[in-house]
Amino acid sequence: MRLCTLSRAVTFASLLMAGTASADQAGQISAEHAWIRVLPAGLPAGGYVVLRNKGDQAVALTSASSSHYAAAMLHQSSTEGGMGRMRMVDRLDIPAHGETALAPGGYHLMLMQASTPVQAGETIPVSLTFADGSQLKVPFLARPANAVDAGNTTTGAMDSMPMEHPSHDH
Ligand SMILES: [Cu+2]
C-alpha cells in the first residue's frame, strides 16, 4: 500500500519534470532537417529527421505524436526480394555523441489521418518521446510528394551553407 503510493508519487514527479530538466534525454537531442512527405488522398505521410545526441549516454526514441494526425508510428522500410516492406519499431537508438537519421527508404515516422489536409510549405509540430518519457517538440516542414529531402529552406541547410560556399555571394 505504502510502496504503491510512493511509486505513484515518483511517477508523477518525473512527469512534471519531463521537458523542463536539461538532464533528461530530450535535452540531449537536437533535431535537424525535419520534414514530412505529404501524399495525396489522405495517404499516410512519412516524417523524416536527423536526430543528434550530444550526450554521453545513448538515447532511445520510443514514440511520436502530433495534434495534426490521429496517429504517428515509428516504422522501418526495407526491401526484401524486390518487395518494399515496413515494420513497426519499438525503439530507435541514437548513440552517444552520434546521430540517427530517419530518411526515405529507412526509418521514418508514419503519420496517419491528418485532421485537416496538410499543404506543402506548412510547418507541422511533432512531439518526439524518448525512453525516459521526456519529449522534444520539432517543427516538421511539409514538402510535396516528389520531394526526396528537406530541401534548401530549412535552417539546418542554411547553417551548412557557409562551409560549402565561403564568403562570396551568389
Ligand atoms: Cu511506414
Image (cartoon, rainbow, N blue to C red):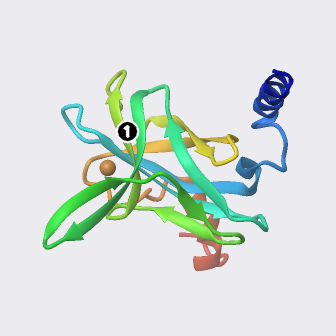
**Residue 121 location (% of width, % of height):** 41, 39
Residue depicted at x 79% and y 68%: 56
Tell me which residue sits at (47%, 59%) in the image.
152
Helix, strand or loop at label 1? It is strand
What residue type is disc 1 on?
Leu
Q: Mark 1 points at which residue?
A: 111
In this view, 61 is above or below 121: below
Q: In this view, does 100 lie to the left or right of 107?
A: right
* Extreme-front residue of the structure: 1
Q: Nearer the viewer, residue 117 or 6?
A: 6
Q: Which of 160 and 35 is in front in this view?
A: 35
Q: Residue 85 is drawn in which quadrant? A: bottom left
Instruction: Judge: label 1 CB < 8 Å from ligand 1.
Output: no
Q: Which residue is drawn at 80% across and 30% down?
A: 7
Q: 69 above or below 152?
A: above
Q: Which of 35 and 9 is in front in this view?
A: 9
Residue 165 visible somewhere in the drawing: no
Label 1: how many Cα within 10 Å (few below 14, some 14–19, many 20+): many
Picture quadrant of residue 79: bottom left
* Residue, far left: 82
| Residue 24 visible somewhere in the drawing | yes
